[in-house]
Image (cartoon, grey):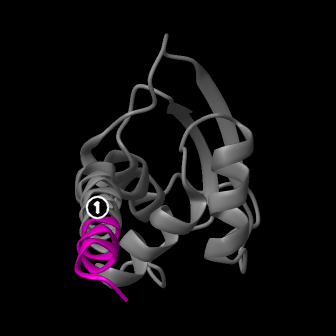
Amino acid sequence: MSVAAQRQAAKIVAVTLVLFIGVVAVIGWQAVRYPQTPMPGPAKEAKIIVERGTSLVEIARRLAERGLIRHPSWFRFYANERGLSQKLKAGQYTLSSAMTPAEILEHLIEGVPIEGSR
């Protein structure tokens, strides 16, 4: 391989590496900010009922379906990382898309009991 070809290959590798690091940094920054970032757009309220024994996977899916959170997997990771996934209570909740994922999680921990959920 000629010197010019080696330089060209090195430039391609360098640009690819810089782009990769940039993408990872942007995703990482979004993940770090996620718990404190509400959904964009106008706020809307949604009611959600969490029955006893409902998994965190199912709760996160329901929240995303109702437009309350954007990334169900990030929500689950945040709850698990904080050690709160087992503290979620059955209840009926009125939540808003203006709430951050951290605020939604706090409401799910406080819980509003529904009939038969005790």
Q: Is 84 within the magenta?
A: no
- Residue furthest to the front in view is 2
- Pick the residue in front: 6 or 86: 6
91 to 116, vertically: above or below: above
- Pick the residue in front: 64 or 21: 21
What residue did someone put label 1 on?
15
In the image, what residue occupies the spot 28% across and 61% down? 15
Assign the magenta stretch its main secondary structure. helix
Q: Position of residue 71 (x, y in %)?
A: 54, 54
Q: Position of residue 7 (x, y in %)?
A: 23, 73
59 to 92, vertically: above or below: below
62 to 40, vertically: above or below: below
Q: Considering the numbered disc 1 on the image, is that residue within a helix, a strand or a loop?
A: helix
Which range of residues does the magenta coloring cover? 1-12
Badge 1: few (under 14), some or many (20 or more) residues near its Cα, within 10 Å? few
Q: Position of residue 105 (x, y in %)?
A: 41, 57
